[in-house]
Amino acid sequence: MRRIALTSLCLIVAAACSEDVTSQVYPRLDIVATHVDDDGSPLLDFGPVPVLIPRELRLELANRSRATLEIRNLVIEGEEGVFSLAEPFEETISLRANESIEVRVVFRPARQGPFSGFLLVESNDPDKKEARVGLIGEGSTIGRAHIEPDTIDFGMVGEWTQEVENVRIASMGSAPLLVESVEIVEGSSPAFAVLGSTRPVELPAGRDGKPGGEVVVQVACAPTGDIVEDELFGTLRIRTTDPDRREVEIPLHATVNRAPIAEFSVDPHNHAPNLPIALDGTASHDVDGHEPLSFEWRIKYQPFGATVVFDDPTSPTPTLTVSEPGEYVIGLDVYDSLGVRCHPEDGSLATPCKVQTLQIQAEDDLEIVLKWTHPTTDLDLHLLEGNAELYSEGDCFWDNRTPDFGIPGDATDDPRFTRESLKGYGPEEIVFSKPSGGKYRVVVEFAKDNGAAKPETLATIEVKVFGILEAQKSQVLVKPGQIWEVLEIDWPSATLTPIDVIREAVAR
């Protein structure tokens, strides 16, 4: 008996010694849904939902253990497309103790009537490796779409213009209507486009036979020069949640009226101020034959202070008269008999379709003007021929106003001192109608301070060649007796070379 007892004791002790003092901890999946089914399992009940209108519910997946829970997969079971995950499951999700995630499930009934399915949750919970969440819902009311017109014909659309037509979508059913997409079908002419936003929009349900909500879609036809077809076709596709008219396609059609071409020439003679210049736009034409054309002449650029007059700016052959020499940019627009305008390169209404630059020459080839900033002091302008000295016979100035330059005895190539100012600001001016070939120097002399306490002044020389300002030089002169050698003119090349040297006058 003792032996048996000892043996039993040893067995008891051995069993106690071999027992693991720790127990295994397993992850525990807890699912919290909107409802609980009759058998106690979690349930998402979407209730009645309008046909084809999505409704979203959320459930919680939580880890109620100290061990890490792995959500390995989420799978929808049921009629395809009716129940779905708002975000696709892509990889295993790990949850630590008391962590949780939300899963968004969408119900979109394809028709009226009840629907059911399951969400399968696969995890590493040994007791819930494949847990199912019930999914139920009912397709209830139906959205109905009324869309007009059935077709759109834009008629004749001018090249580089735009015509817009409206498409009305009205909600007439017992459920809200979702306008899911509005698009131009691939293969349509690129001239067709939907204007404005094409994002989905939900329209309220109809009431008492009247629309509950409506939206207007604007469709444009805008043919450009890149479109070679003269007849355009396309299709507008509208997709809604009307189960009987999921997609409505509206044919689009237009014909293109090509823009006319503006061309014109300028009479090469008499490009001088105050003389009429003949313009001829009769080379303009319309490729479609929509004539007669209408003409609109205008000036894109003109010198400051100049005036420009067309005798008839709507004539194909007007005359143009300008008041000042300089550079002018003439523009012409033409319109066909249907009112379509020619197309400028930059596409702007502010830019004429056809432009030409016109140089208006002055009556005098050279014009030299001196101005200064002091109200009292007196500065003198000189133009020296070749190496002539100041106040010599080769100097054009206030006391030698028409010296004999160039060919002796020929007054046509002589300069003229035309404007003198004895004090304050100027201007003094020398004009040279037809200079003989050679070199000429422009010189400024500070003649008198006329008692000014602070005689310092800023002198400015402007040289115009054929009426165009080609040089503008400025220098500060501080006292009488200073000579400013400004620049040299080489004629007939009209090369202007700066000298810009100040020296003291030599006593006379």
Image (spheres, rainbow, N blue to C red):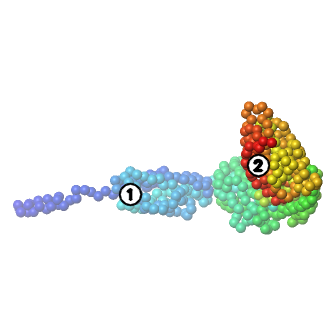
Question: Toward the viewer: 230 or 301?
Answer: 301
CA gap between label 2 and label 1 equals 93 Å
Relative to 51, 272 lies left or right: right
Which residue is at 17% across, 58% downward?
Answer: 16
Which quadrant is the N terminus positioned in?
A: bottom left
Which residue is at 47% across, 53% downward?
Answer: 102
Q: Is residue 291 visible?
A: no
Relative to 216, 397 lies left or right: right
Relative to 496, 98 lies left or right: left
Q: Position of residue 268 (x, y in %)?
A: 91, 60
**On the image, numbered disc 1 is attached to which residue?**
69
Which residue is at 89% across, 61% downward?
Answer: 265
Q: Is residue 482 visible?
A: yes
Relative to 203, 350 lies left or right: right
Q: Position of residue 504 (x, y in %)?
A: 74, 43
Badge 1: how crowded within 10 Å, few (<14), some, or many (20+)? many
Circle 2: element type:
strand
Question: Toward the viewer: 73 or 211?
Answer: 73
Circle 1: element type:
strand
**On the image, numbered disc 2 is attached to which residue?**
486
Give the mark nearer the N terminus: 2 vs 1: 1
Image vertical order of residue 367 relative to residue 247, above or below: above
Of circles 2 and 1, the one toward us is 2
Q: Which numbered circle lies on residue 241?
A: none
Which residue is at 61% across, 57% downward?
Answer: 52
Question: Toward the viewer: 295 or 292?
Answer: 295
